Image (spheres, rainbow, N blue to C red):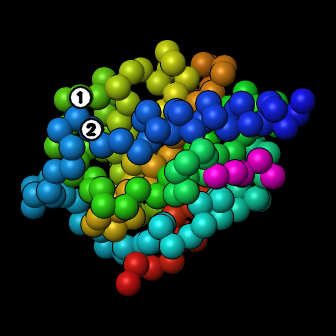
């Protein structure tokens, strides 16, 4: 029974990641332009890290997630999902190769909720097609290097919780541990 619940939750998270975390904004991938492509001073390579190692157990626990719940999300081998102990809150981290942050910056009008951020010294955007406070979901995309984005996608069941705060704290925990890009 518990195994079935975990599988069901994994499928829900996988579909959430597929719908929001791994698809570029409409219009496909755009090439970074000098005026919209941010500079990444200390490039990191998230794709070289096994996805479930992106968030160490102690950090998962400090975020209110079950440290043992990290599992690869569906068919996307670049993504891992963690759950709260009661499985009502979910976090997915996904390394997205061949994607630039400019693809979000150049298409900001497609997002009802959009903000430019700096997280762990890296440029990032909060890009959501709906209001995170109404739906309890939030997506943040961080440029780890010029052609790679690390996505943090959160879904909380209690909409009074800050889904975007959790997504940002997960990236703050993950990025400093990433290896330097070569």
> In the shown orientation, is residue 90 left or right of residue 30?
right
Residue 159 image point, x, y percent: 60, 19
**Image point (56%, 70%), residue name:** 49
- Residue 114 seen in render: yes
Residue 61 image point, x, y percent: 77, 50
**Image point (36%, 51%), residue name:** 124
Rendered image quadrant of residue 32: bottom left
Rendered image quadrant of residue 51: bottom right
**Image point (26%, 43%), residue name:** 104
Quarter that holds the C terminus:
bottom left
> In the shown orientation, is residue 121 left or right of residue 41?
right
**Image point (52%, 28%), residue name:** 137
| Looking at the image, residue 54 lies above or below residue 158 | below
Rendered image quadrant of residue 129: top left
| Looking at the image, residue 103 lies above or below residue 108 | below
Q: Which of pointers 1 and 2 lies earlier in the amino acid sequence?
A: 2
The residues colored magenta run: 68-72
Q: Which mark is residue 25?
A: 2
Front-lying residue, 99 or 129:
99
Separation of disc 1 and disc 2 at Cα?
7 Å
The residue identified by callout 1 is 110
Does the CB distance between marks 1 and 2 fall below 8 Å?
Answer: yes
Residue 8 image point, x, y percent: 71, 30
In this view, the residue farthest toward the bottom is 182
Determine whether the residue tagged by mark 2 lies in a helix, strand or loop: loop
């Amino acid at each position: 029974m518990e195994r079935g619940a975990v599988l069901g939750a994994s499928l829900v998270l996988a579909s959430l990641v597929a719908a929001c975390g791994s698809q570029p904004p409409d219009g496909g991938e755009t090439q970074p332009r000098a005026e919209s492509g941010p500079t990444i001073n200390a490039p990191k390579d998230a794709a070289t890290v096994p996805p479930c190692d992106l968030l160490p157990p102690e950090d998962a626990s400090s975020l209110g997630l079950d440290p043992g719940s990290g599992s690869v999300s569906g068919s996307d081998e670049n993504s891992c999902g963690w759950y709260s102990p009661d499985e009502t809150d979910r976090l997915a981290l996904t390394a997205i190769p061949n994607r630039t942050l400019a693809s979000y910056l150049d298409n900001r009008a497609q997002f009802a909720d959009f903000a430019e951020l700096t997280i762990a010294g890296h440029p990032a955007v909060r890009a959501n097609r709906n209001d995170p406070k109404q739906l309890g979901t939030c997506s943040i995309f961080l440029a780890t290097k010029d052609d790679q984005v690390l996505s943090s996608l959160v879904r909380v069941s209690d909409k009074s919780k800050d889904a975007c705060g959790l997504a940002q704290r997960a990236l703050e925990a993950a990025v400093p541990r990433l290896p330097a890009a070569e």
